Image (tube, rainbow, N blue to C red):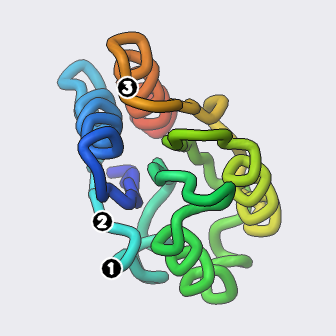
Amino acid sequence: MPRLLFVHHTVSPATHDCYQAALEGARDPSIKGVEVVSRAALVASATDVLEADGYLLGTPVNLGYLAGAMKHFFDTIYYPCIDETRGRPFGAYLHGNQGLEGGQRALDTITTGLGWKPAQATVGVLGAPGPSDLADCRELGAAVAAGLSL
């Protein structure tokens, strides 16, 4: 059964709302045959990444860059996973209270280096997530999971 690894850094009510919506989408009962595994960025391991077939990523953008926890995740898994995970699909949401450009640039650079392929455009959420933001996060989770379904 294909496995979707959802790596997230969920530290605020806004990021929690995005996380819940994306997880709900990934676990939509109409999507059959995909195991969804959720791990906080500070505990997700290279083994988790190697055992997954695709990735869902969620993080705040702090001070114009990915949250330190998400950067730590990437620093930890980069070399152990670089050859084994090339070509795997991923999707991501970024949340910030100011601009997301620096976080998007970092995400693009890291995932390009890993050779991961975007399954969906990154969802960007500024400020408190509204209904359309949460719908976008839900759709992101569902689309990435559906792409792995049997």
Is 11 displayed left or right of 66 in the figure?
A: left
Q: Which mark is residue 43?
A: 1
Image spot of residue 101 (x, y percent): 75, 43
Is 13 displayed left or right of 117 in the figure?
A: left
Q: Which residue is mark 3?
A: 129
Q: In front: mark 2 or mark 3? A: 3
Mark 2 secondary-structure assignment: strand
Q: Residue at x 74, y 67 (%)?
A: 114
Camera-side residue of 84 and 39 = 39
Dot placed on the residue nearer the N-terminal end, 2 or 3: 2
Mark 3 secondary-structure assignment: loop
Q: Residue at x 46, y 73 (%)?
A: 69
Mark 1 secondary-structure assignment: loop
Q: Residues within 10 Å of mark 1 (few under 14, many from 20)?
A: few
Image spot of residue 10 (x, y percent): 31, 55
State whether residue 79 appears in this view: yes
Q: Which mark is residue 39?
A: 2
